[in-house]
Image (cartoon, rainbow, N blue to C red):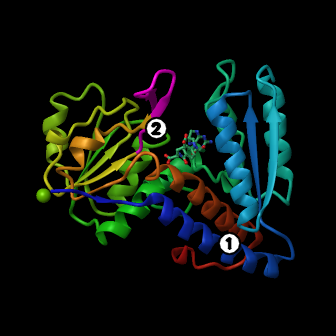
Amino acid sequence: MTAQIIDGKAFAAGLRERVGKVAADFEAKAGRKAGLAVVLVGEDPASQVYVRNKGKQTIACGMESFEHKLAADTSEADLLAVVEKLNADPAVDGILVQLPLPSHMNEQKVIAAINPDKDVDGFHVVNVGRLSTGLPGFVPCTPLGCVMLLKDQLGSLSGLDAVVVGRSNIVGKPMAQLLIAESCTVTVAHSRTQDLPEVVRRADIVVAAVGRPEMIKGEWIKPGATVIDVGINRVAGAEEGKTRLVGDVDFGSASEVAGAITPVPGGVGPMTIAVLLRNTIVAAHRNAGIALDESTI
Ligand SMILES: Nc1nc2c(c(=O)[nH]1)N[C@@H](CN(C=O)c1ccc(C(=O)N[C@@H](CCC(=O)O)C(=O)O)cc1)CN2
Ligand SMILES: [Mg+2]
């Protein structure tokens, strides 16, 4: 079997187009643009690229982008003060603090300072609780993007066996919650799982978010399964001094067995920012008290 390639880049472009239309409608109704504030602490090169792309795509969708770039040695108290200002700013509908933060900062404490109703990353404990109890809130962008791709590919996910490999707060745990909400039978596996290949082999849906380059092999995959690769790992390339991006799945062997698979790059990655923009326009409507059928985006 040769797997169908799930084109996350194209799906994300379509999602941004829908967000753009809803953002124009919001501006007409609210008399202002929706606004997203992104806070970057330090100079991590990958984070700088992600923050730049967030700003560009926010503007391209017809929303306002507020960028706050703080030095790597900024104190936690100063960062908390920036978050407090953004909480109080009526032009700001969504707030995002780019992760990872420098090691002298407590990420949980910083996330806890964000107003949950502006927490478009869905990382605040209030939103984690809302997700796990089925209340409306904000859902982390990467796992929500994965579910959008899965539903587009498979239609209903009800009754399917899903294995999530990875148990991070940002991807693995919310991914499991979302799949439970879609009536999947969910197993969360991780680096200490015994006989991981056998566990993965049961799955109709495999979500790989373990952070280990090309760990999940084709012979672990049930023929015809749908494979969602969340990994973004930079490894040495074929040419000296060059690098390349690979996922957590060994794409070459897995694409011979799977029914459908996301590539890296161009699969899950582009969905992260597109869903962030979706969450922001949703936040703007909720916070302004303007009705929106959220299921249409
Ligand atoms: N506050 C947050 N911090 C981080 C998040 C997040 O959702 N909120 N996620 C990641 C980084 N991230 C966005 O912030 C992100 C990662 C990857 C991509 C992406 O488009 N990837 C491309 C490849 C990009 C490349 O060439 O390097 C792909 O996979 O095709 C976008 C956003 C951690 N921090
Ligand atoms: Mg079955």
Q: Residue at x 17, y 50 (%)?
A: 257
Which quadrant does the C terminus fall into? bottom right
Where residue 76 appears, x then y in whole percent?
Answer: 76, 25
The answer to whether the beta carbon of the residue marked 2 is less than 8 Å from any atom of ligand 1 is: yes
Instruction: Please name the residue that numbered disc 2 is placed on.
Output: 232
Q: Is disc 2 placed on a helix, strand or loop?
A: loop
Q: Is residue 253 above or below residue 32?
A: above
Disc 1: CA contacts within 10 A as few (<14), some (14-19) or many (>=20):
many
Q: Residue at x 28, y 38 (%)?
A: 250
Q: Is residue 182 above or below residue 254?
A: below
Disc 2: CA contacts within 10 A as few (<14), some (14-19) or many (>=20):
many
Instruction: Please name the residue that numbered disc 1 is placed on.
Output: 20
Q: Left or right: 126 with respect to 33? A: left
User: In this picture, which residue range is highlighted in magenta?
Assistant: 230-244
Amino acid tagged 1: Gly
Give the image quarter of residue 218. top left
Q: Left or right: 239 with respect to 261? A: right
Q: Residue at x 47, y 57 (%)?
A: 145
Which quadrant does the N terminus fall into? bottom left
Query: In the depicted view, which residue is nearer to us: 142 or 248?
Result: 248
The secondary structure that dominates the magenta segment is loop
Amino acid tagged 2: Ile
Q: Residue at x 70, y 71 (%)?
A: 285
Where residue 125 appears, x then y in whole percent?
Answer: 57, 43
Give the image quarter of residue 6. bottom left
Let me know if residue 135 appears in the view: no
Indicate which disc, 2 or 1, sits on the residue closer to the N terminus: 1
* Residue 295: mark in rendering: none
The answer to whether the beta carbon of the residue marked 1 is less than 8 Å from any atom of ligand 1 is: no
Image region (quadrant) for ligand 1: top right
Where residue 52 appears, x then y in whole percent?
Answer: 72, 45
